[in-house]
């Protein structure tokens, strides 16, 4: 298999917003409880937060973190999570058929974010609640003092406002599974009212309205158009969510999930621009791809619906997918898609962070370790800085059951201070790919270093007992001669190349 790329500094996609490398923490399964928060764990501080997990989250390089849901937020009462911990109510979590103990709420989570060094992206409940509760939460979080809610925050131990600027107006309101699911018109009207009221409290806000839960939703396209027609003047972002898994042995199709993400983004951009045209507006609305990952959703589907009335566990093991090399290569491919759309996707959240469809796993009382998917995310977040470059790609194709023939190689590139970072994926499941890259537009470059994820077994995984089975490996084939980079990519691989 062969592929040829041309890059030139005169052809940028756009600046890379660091929010592209966001994460997502939902009150779900063992994410918060027995994940990031485990009082009594040998590494836990007096606040109950595991320091080993904090170190891994920092290493992962997640920027903005979306919280507290997800489907969970559509039944959540934020007031339950503030005030003395011992007095907090235990509630039914309808989304995940669990008991929410509320031992972690806004204050605790914000303290954790301070330790991690990430920014909060806070979601309000527009499933069972509305304008008043959203404004109350904003008053509590951002008003300095002198009002009931702000003084309540101060009495609860937080003198300074939280100063949260990035807010999600509900979650996946197009989904019939969502508590309080609405039509596009109903949701669009509500989101507009909530956004307007929130901006009366705080003019600094960046607001994200819900787009479709995925591209296969029957309302996809019309949902975005209708919601944006209602909220055009009120919001800054519309969200996209997408999860991928291998279907029926179509490994090449799974690796090519980025082509679906490309089409999804292009369609939402077209819809945004359609509404802009109809409104005769100059306003810019971007995409917040605030849930994306590999998720073996069919496994969860089998579990759902089997719960009994007396079965409301605390922190059950839910959605604890164990990721393989192929999953990591797919995650790398999805990051390539996001980078190639850096002009319109300026916020994104890997869903999720710890234990729940997560790059980081933990055992109660035991270790924390990196899943395979940790590595492409961490390497990309670290290296992809500055400006995304347009990639002109001429590649052989591979057949897939899901998407027909697709380019065997996917690529993204970034540049900062004259250096170039390349991100490459080989979707061929049996054959190495020889890639050449014309870098003559960057005459000062002289050396190339390549690191990647691949293995003889594409289904190899990291586990508690073998946490370093899959780690990044040096690819010694990368060489730069006469302005042309050459590299050989193993089958089913993801590679990052630093050219300086
Ligand atoms: O990330 C898991 C779930 O996926 C989220 O709660 C929901 O928003 C989406 O359907």
Image (tube, rainbow, N blue to C red):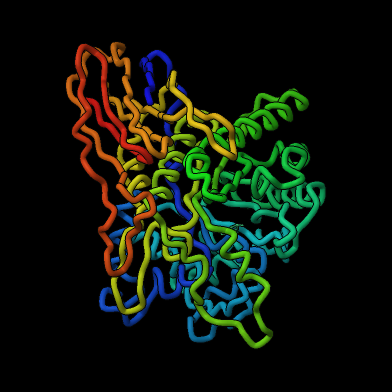
Q: Is residue 146 visible?
A: no
Q: Residue furthest front?
A: 430
Where is residue 401 drawn, in percent x and y?
58, 39
Q: Check the image and report above or below for 394 versus 60.
A: above
User: Could you tell me which quadrant the C terminus lies in?
Assistant: top left
The answer to whether residue 422 is left or right of residue 195 is: left
Residue for point 38% across, 64% down: 112
Q: Nearer the viewer, residue 468 or 390?
A: 468
Tell me if I can see residue 11 in this picture: yes
Residue 444 occupies quadrant: top left
Residue 202, percent from left and from top? 59, 49
Number of dots carrying numbers: 0
Coordinates of residue 446 in the picture (x, y in percent) = 17, 20
Q: Residue at x 39, y 65 (%)?
A: 111
330, 90: nearer the viewer: 330
- Quarter, ligand 1: bottom right
Dividing the picture into quarters, in which one does residue 130 lie?
bottom right
Q: Is residue 34 left or right of residue 216?
A: left
What residue do we see at 63% from left, 41% from top? 238
> Residue, x 34% and y 49% (percent of image)?
61
- Considering only vertical position in the picture, is 259 above or below 123? above
**Relative image position of residue 91 (x, y in whole percent):** 62, 80
**Quadrant of the snapshot with the N terminus:** top left
Q: Residue furthest bottom?
A: 310
């Amino acid at each position: 298999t062969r592929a040829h790329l041309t890059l030139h500094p005169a052809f940028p996609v756009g600046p890379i917003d660091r929010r592209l490398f966001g994460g997502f923490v939902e009150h779900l399964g063992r994410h918060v409880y027995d994940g990031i928060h485990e009082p009594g764990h040998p590494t836990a501080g007096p606040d109950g937060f595991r320091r080993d997990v904090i170190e891994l989250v920092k290493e992962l390089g997640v920027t903005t973190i979306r919280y507290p849901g997800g489907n969970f937020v559509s039944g959540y009462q934020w007031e339950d999570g503030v005030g003395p911990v011992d007095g907090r109510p235990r509630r039914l979590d309808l989304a995940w058929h669990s008991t929410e103990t509320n031992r972690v709420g806004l204050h605790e989570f914000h303290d954790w974010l301070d330790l991690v060094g990430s920014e909060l992206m806070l979601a309000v409940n527009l499933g069972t609640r509305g304008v008043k509760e959203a404004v109350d939460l904003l008053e509590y979080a951002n008003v300095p003092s002198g009002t009931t809610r702000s003084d309540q925050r101060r009495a609860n131990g937080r003198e300074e406002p939280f100063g949260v600027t990035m807010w999600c107006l509900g979650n996946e309101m197009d989904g019939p599974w969502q508590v309080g699911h609405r039509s596009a018109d109903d949701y669009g009207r509500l989101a507009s009212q909530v956004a307007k009221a929130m901006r009366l409290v705080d003019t600094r806000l960046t607001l994200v309205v819900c787009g479709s839960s995925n591209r296969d939703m029957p309302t996809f396209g019309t949902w975005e158009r209708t919601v944006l027609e209602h909220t055009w003047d009120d919001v800054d972002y519309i969200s996209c969510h997408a999860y991928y898994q291998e279907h029926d042995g179509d490994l090449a199709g799974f690796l090519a999930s980025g082509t679906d993400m490309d089409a999804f983004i292009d369609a939402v951009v077209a819809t945004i621009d359609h509404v802009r045209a109809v409104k005769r507006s100059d306003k810019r609305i971007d995409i917040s791809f605030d849930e994306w990952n590999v998720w073996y959703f069919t496994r969860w589907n089998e579990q759902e619906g089997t719960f009994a009335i007396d079965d409301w566990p605390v922190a059950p093991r839910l959605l604890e997918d164990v990721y393989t090399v192929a999953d990591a290569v797919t995650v790398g491919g999805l990051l390539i898609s996001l980078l190639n759309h850096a002009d319109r996707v300026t916020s994104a959240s890997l869903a999720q962070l710890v234990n729940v469809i997560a790059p980081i796993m933990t055992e109660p009382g035991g270790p924390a370790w990196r899943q395979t998917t940790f590595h492409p995310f961490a390497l990309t977040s670290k290296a992809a800085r500055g400006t995304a470059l347009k990639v002109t790609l001429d590649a052989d194709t591979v057949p897939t059951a899901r998407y027909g023939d697709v380019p065997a190689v996917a690529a993204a590139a970034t540049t900062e201070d004259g250096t170039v970072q390349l991100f490459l994926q080989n979707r061929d499941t049996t054959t190495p790919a020889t890639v050449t890259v014309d870098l003559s537009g960057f005459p000062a470059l002289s050396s190339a270093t390549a690191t990647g994820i691949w293995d003889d077994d594409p289904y190899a995984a990291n586990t508690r007992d073998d946490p370093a089975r899959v780690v990044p490996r040096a690819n010694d084939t990368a060489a730069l001669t006469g302005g042309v980079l050459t590299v050989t990519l193993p089958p089913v691989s993801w590679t990052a190349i630093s050219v300086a």
